[in-house]
Image (tube, rainbow, N blue to C red):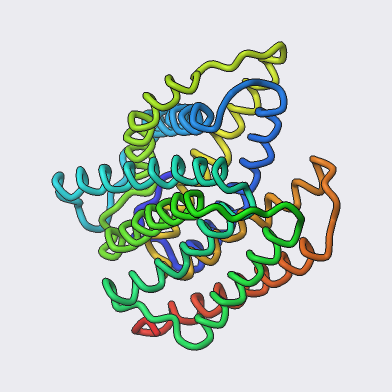
Amino acid sequence: MSHAAGSLPVGRGLLYLIIAGAAWGTAGAAASLVYQTSDMGPLALSFWRCAGGLLPLLAVRLLRPPVRTAVREPLGRKALRTGVTGLALAVFQTAYFAAVEATGLAVGTVVTLGAGPVLIALGARLLMGERLGLGGVSAVLGALAGLGVLALGGDGATVRPWGVLLALVSAAAYSVMTLYTRWSGRDGGTDASGTTLSAFAVTSLCLLPFALAEGALPHTVELGRVFWLMAYIAVVPTALAYVLYFAGAAVVRSATVSVIMLLEPVSAAVLAVVLLGEHLTAATLGGTALMLGSVAGLALAEARGAREPVLV
């Protein structure tokens, strides 16, 4: 897929973000299966996720004609966007994996994904004048409450300061990536597939030394299964999902983007119950209902606001 950000309707951008958030959630289940059948670590998997995602994007780029954007992006700005997005993506992923290792999946997820919408809403208000309004604030708070119930509703959550700090670093990097994508897409001068391709190239280079130190190649008797799982991770929740994410994030208000992407833990929770045999609990149901309701409300408000001459 290739899209000039400025030519994308807000309604379609919202749909792209919903699909991307759901696809991101499947990466966790696929990664769990990789960990169960091999000795591959999270940094190596993250590297192969980005490096593998380059291949389908390069194939599409070679087979399809270049995208003509409404406003031609200057070379210097394009280089800056590539560097900022790629470095932010590398820090976002690496710090998140480190936070999960330090303080556990539940706390790491809640702090990273919970702090993200708050930081993004503040940044969008201060840097771009975007306001959520009372309804938007209520939706954000509802989504964060749902995230907390969903992730912390089970047993064994442990809070460790070092892990929380790493999760906040991850959230800050995610916020930079989202805000910069929104800012650079406001004049229609960006290409979603090109942004994804360049970001993955930078991120892969940043993660390569860490992957080599951890052990880049898996050792397993089920190499074929691991290969197909990694191929899925590289293509669907990475190459496809990030193209959709960058396209949607360029035309949708930043705080709305951050709340819609909270569909990732909802998707992961559903897959954990359906595919991995985890129990369906009251926390899973309650947290999922809160988050889906908040996402739906904010998406409807965004679609209505797109018809108005100013952001409110």
Residue 115 position (above or below residue 170): below
Q: Position of residue 53 (x, y in %)?
A: 47, 32
The percent coordinates of residue 97 (x first, y second) are 52, 41
Residue located 14% across and 46% down the image: 76
Residue in view at x 66 percent, y 28 percent: 34
Q: Where 98 sits versus 224, above or below?
A: below
Instruction: Please count the marks in the image.
Output: 0
**In front here: 94 or 59?**
94
Q: Quadrant of the C terminus?
A: bottom left
- Tell whether 276 sits left or right of 122: right
Q: Residue at horizontal 63%, vertical 72%?
A: 145
Quadrant of the rendered image containing residue 290: bottom right
144 to 197, vertically: above or below:
below
Query: Residue 130, located in which quarter of the rendered image?
Result: bottom left
Q: Furthest-front residue in view?
A: 161
The residue lying toward the viewer, choosing from 162 and 78, is: 162
User: Which residue appears at 39% of the width and 40% of the height?
Assistant: 90
Work out whether residue 72 or residue 163 is closer to the camera in this orientation and state it.
Answer: 163
Which residue is more in the foreground, 311 or 290?
290
- Horizontally, is 295 left or right of 52 in the view? right
Query: Left or right of 285: which side holds 81?
Result: left
Residue 79 in picture, x, y percent from top left: 20, 43
Tell me residue 123's x, y (percent). Answer: 33, 69
